[in-house]
Image (cartoon, helix red, strand yellow):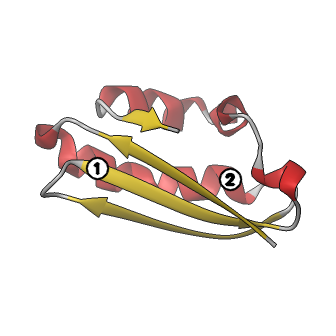
């Protein structure tokens, strides 16, 4: 099993949008090959978000972010929430 950890920052005033977005992201990655599980969290004090996902193999864990953009609504909501991904 492989674990992928993605961290990001968001504008503090957009916390409600970011929290709503978390379930959209979880749904988008569930359809990817090798997916095993997902956990996400938001820290309101530091305006950061973390996503931890489990994968069957390294190749599945290293999917490019654009693969989750098959759902245009999720991608649009990420940008409108002011979220930025940190790798």
- Label 2, label 1: how far apart the Cα atoms are: 20 Å
Q: Answer with left or right where residue 3 lies relative to residue 73.
A: right
Q: Which mark is residue 29?
A: 2
Residue 54 placed where, x, y %? 70, 68
Q: Nearer the viewer, mark 2 or mark 1?
A: 1
Q: Answer with left or right where residue 10 lies relative to residue 1.
A: left
Q: Earlier in the sequence, mark 2 or mark 1?
A: 2
Marks 2 and 1 in Cβ contact (< 8 Å): no
The correct choice, above or below, for 1 with respect to 84 in the image is: below
SS at circle 1: strand
Q: Residue at x 37, y 65 (%)?
A: 41
Residue 5 placed where, x, y %? 56, 56
Q: In front here: 19 or 57?
A: 57
Q: Residue at x 71, y 60 (%)?
A: 30
Which residue carries the number 1 mark?
48
Q: Residue at x 52, y 39 (%)?
A: 87
Q: Which mark is residue 10?
A: none
């Amino acid at each position: 099993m492989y674990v992928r950890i993605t961290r990001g920052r968001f504008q503090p005033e957009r916390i409600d949008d970011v929290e709503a977005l978390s379930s959209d992201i979880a749904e988008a990655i569930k359809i990817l090959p090798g997916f095993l599980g997902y956990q996400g969290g938001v820290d309101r004090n530091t305006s950061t978000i973390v996503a931890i996902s489990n994968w069957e193999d390294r190749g599945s864990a290293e999917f490019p972010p654009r693969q989750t953009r098959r759902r245009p609504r999720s991608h649009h909501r990420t940008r409108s929430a002011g979220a930025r991904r940190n790798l």
